[in-house]
Image (cartoon, rainbow, N blue to C red):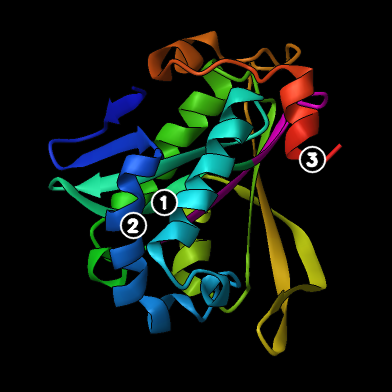
Amino acid sequence: MFSRQLTDRIRLSLSVQAHAEELFALTERNRDFLRQWLPWLDMTTGVDDTRAFLERQLYGFANGDSLTATIFYDGKAAGVAGFNTIDRTNGIGSIGYWLGEEFNGKGIMTRVVEDLIEIGREHYSLQKIEIRCAPENARSRAIPRRLGFQYEGTLRRAERIYDGWHDSEGIRCCCEGAGTPLRRSRVLENQVGLRRPRRAETEMRKGR
């Protein structure tokens, strides 16, 4: 299975259904904390919701459209990070992430995002990586700036979080020397043993 040991204490592993119970427990402990910025908490009310989410993400990974990884700190699930979307035509990846409150302030996410940039450049041939976050989310905004990302602009009222609208600040990083067309990552795919679903299977999942 795809797994990267970033430091003695930080490990990044492809999110699989075996992580569901631990990730749901982390979500439950941090529900109020995460609710400030994440819109999906009301749709995640049981471990089966987390398990279904992880299953969808694995299909996205198999198709080369996304990559979702669980962050482990000292062997415990600490959060999730990855590429929410991968634009294979234009070589652009959009990184998203969250951490449980008890794991903030330890430099974990900066190291994880740094590794995701390397994955994007080396395995997906991305020429541009972007991160979007609310201007009020100071901790989230600090990570890409710390890693040398450049501010691109702010989209007004770009995301609805429960009963309010939030702006979205776009920050991007250009990956020098990675301008070749995007290739599906055989290295990562082989590590987890996934295959691209057949067309018929994809159509069945879409209800066709």
| Mark before the other along the chain sequence, 2 or 3 | 2
Q: Quadrant of the N terminus?
A: top left
- Relative to 13, residue 143 above or below: below
Q: Nearer the viewer, mark 3 or mark 1?
A: 3
Please, is residue 61 above or below residue 34 in the view?
A: above
Disc 1 designates what residue?
80
Given contact means CB atoms under 8 Å apart, are the residues at marks 2 and 1 in contact?
yes
Residue 193, percent from left and from top: 44, 15
Tell me residue 31's x, y (percent): 40, 78
| Image position of 168 (left or right of 35) | right
Judged by depth in the image, the label closer to the viewer, 2 or 1, is 2
State whether residue 112 is above or below residue 151.
Answer: above
Tell me if residue 185 is in the magenta stretch: no
* Residue that appears at 52% across and 73% down: 41
Q: Which residue does the numbered mark 2 point to in the structure image?
A: 23
**Residue carrying label 3:** 206
**Toward which corner of the image does residue 17 lie, by quadrant?**
top left
Q: Is 80 left or right of 170, judged from the image as shown?
A: left
Quadrant of image for the C terminus: top right
Separation of disc 2 and disc 1 at Cα?
Answer: 9 Å
User: Could you tell me residue 51's position as x and y percent?
Assistant: 44, 51
Label 1 sits on a secondary structure element that is strand
Q: CA distance from mark 3 to mark 1?
A: 26 Å
Under circle 2, the secondary element is: helix
Which secondary structure dominates the residues rendered in magenta? strand
